């Protein structure tokens, strides 16, 4: 009988990030009958003395220099899934953090915003990369974009009572502005600080986090928009890479970046950046009454302007016609339902405001080049 391959998982399993990565590692380990997984943390006593652990490889979320130095001292192969300290030369499979920043930057720029702010962790490579991606995206998309930055060490963010500095920074931001917090925990502090200084979210500040811990995001006040990372894939690819390193050390490249999954929009970033009250009212009605199938005639009944006057003002503020904005809102709702639910296509069409399933198919295929069913197969739940 061959000797088992002993793999340590150096992460606490205390949050969504760890647990989803470990799911991917476990999924890969089931393809290798010789793999044995060992947990490291308060729940796993066999690995309390990691420096003297007799194993073959480590998959780790390296989040401190102390941990990085400890792992670098071990005579085993290490795969890092965090990307916080790249200067230790670990093999790494991690999220593409620059692309995450670009995703958020483009999203906020598409909201029509001109001012932006980043809240992050000082001298941690994944946070620095997210800020760099945000800045690149908004500078490319918005002429003379203004990007503020508030970064502090990770220990500072974890200290109770640290909200006062965040609040002071937020109070000085020009509004409306798009705010990118480097993760959901930071975003929650930002939301709390916004309330403390009377900044409206999303009316004045559109806030987006990262990690999409869905219960946390849904219970935030207001519900928090967030980027979901492809964590299970990171875990699976990390285990696959470690297996390759152990078998053929000279053939394995050093770093792989996994693109983020997508941005889940919730209330915190549904901003309508316009000073025109009639345009704002039109946008609120369009997005608030998607399922009812609101169309331009019904919209005009609720707004005390002629259609021509509203069309001119709406196009000047948004760059779209009323009809285009209505169709965009319906299609956005349809895409969410196709990705995140198993509702039948006819129900998706109805809940997205389309009067017939035939019309839904026509509009959807014209916009995306896919039928709704093809879109769901490509982008739907657990499709990766």
Image (spheres, grey):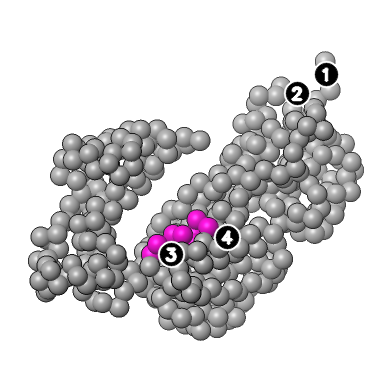
Q: Where is residue 97 in the image (x, y as percent from the top left)?
A: 60, 54
- Are the two marked residues, 1 and 2, in contact with CB atoms closer than 8 angstroms? yes
> In front: mark 3 or mark 2?
3
Q: How far apart are marks 1 and 3 (CA)?
A: 56 Å
Residue 109 is tagged as 3
Q: Distance between the residues labelled 4 and 1?
A: 47 Å
| Residue 311 horizontal side relative to residue 162, left or right | left
Dividing the picture into quadrants, the one containing residue 319 is bottom left
Q: Position of residue 354 (x, y in %)?
A: 19, 46
Q: How far apart are marks 4 and 2 (CA)?
A: 41 Å
Q: How far apart are marks 4 and 3 (CA)?
A: 13 Å
Q: What stretch is highlighted in magenta?
A: 102-111
**Which secondary structure dominates the residues rendered in magenta?**
helix
Badge 4 density bin: few <14, some 14–19, many ≥20, Cα 10 Å: many
Task: First in sequence, mark 4 or 1: give its number.
Answer: 1
Q: How far apart are marks 1 and 2 (CA)?
A: 8 Å
Q: How far apart are marks 3 and 2 (CA)?
A: 50 Å
């Amino acid at each position: 009988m061959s000797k088992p391959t002993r793999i340590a998982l150096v992460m606490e399993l205390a949050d969504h990030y760890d647990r989803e990565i470990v799911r991917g590692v476990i999924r890969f380990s089931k393809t290798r009958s010789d793999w044995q997984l060992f947990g490291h943390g308060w729940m796993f006593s066999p690995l309390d003395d990691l420096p003297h652990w007799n194993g073959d490889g480590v998959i780790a979320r390296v989040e401190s220099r102390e941990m990085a130095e400890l792992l670098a001292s071990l005579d085993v192969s290490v795969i890092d899934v965090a990307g916080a300290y790249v200067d230790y030369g670990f093999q790494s499979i991690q999220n593409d953090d620059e692309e995450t920043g670009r995703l958020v930057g483009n999203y906020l720029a598409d909201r029509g915003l001109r001012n932006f702010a980043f809240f992050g962790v000082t001298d941690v490579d994944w946070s620095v990369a997210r800020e760099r991606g945000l800045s690149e995206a908004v500078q490319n998309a918005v002429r003379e974009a203004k990007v503020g930055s508030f970064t502090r060490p990770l220990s500072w963010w974890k200290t109770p009572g640290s909200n006062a500095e965040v609040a002071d920074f937020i109070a000085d931001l020009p509004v409306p502005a798009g705010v990118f917090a480097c993760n959901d925990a930071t975003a929650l502090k930002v939301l709390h600080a916004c309330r403390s200084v009377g900044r409206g979210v999303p009316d004045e500040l559109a806030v987006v986090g990262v990690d999409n811990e869905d219960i946390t995001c849904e219970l935030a006040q207001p519900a928090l928009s967030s980027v979901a990372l492809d964590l299970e894939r990171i875990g699976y690819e990390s285990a696959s890479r470690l297996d390759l390193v152990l078998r053929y050390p000279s053939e394995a490249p050093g770093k792989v970046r996994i693109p983020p999954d997508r941005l889940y929009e919730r209330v915190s970033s549904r901003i309508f950046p316009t000073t025109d009250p009639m345009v704002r009212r039109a946008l609120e009605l369009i997005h608030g009454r998607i399922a009812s199938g609101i169309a331009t005639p019904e919209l005009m009944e609720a707004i005390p302007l002629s259609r021509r006057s509203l069309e001119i003002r709406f196009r000047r503020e948004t760059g779209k016609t009323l009809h285009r904005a209505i169709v965009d809102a319906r299609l956005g709702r349809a895409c969410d339902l196709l990705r995140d639910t198993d509702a039948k296509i006819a129900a998706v069409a109805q809940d997205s405001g389309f009067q017939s399933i035939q019309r839904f198919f026509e509009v959807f295929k014209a916009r995306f080049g896919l039928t709704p069913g093809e879109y769901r197969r490509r982008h739907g739940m657990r499709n990766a």
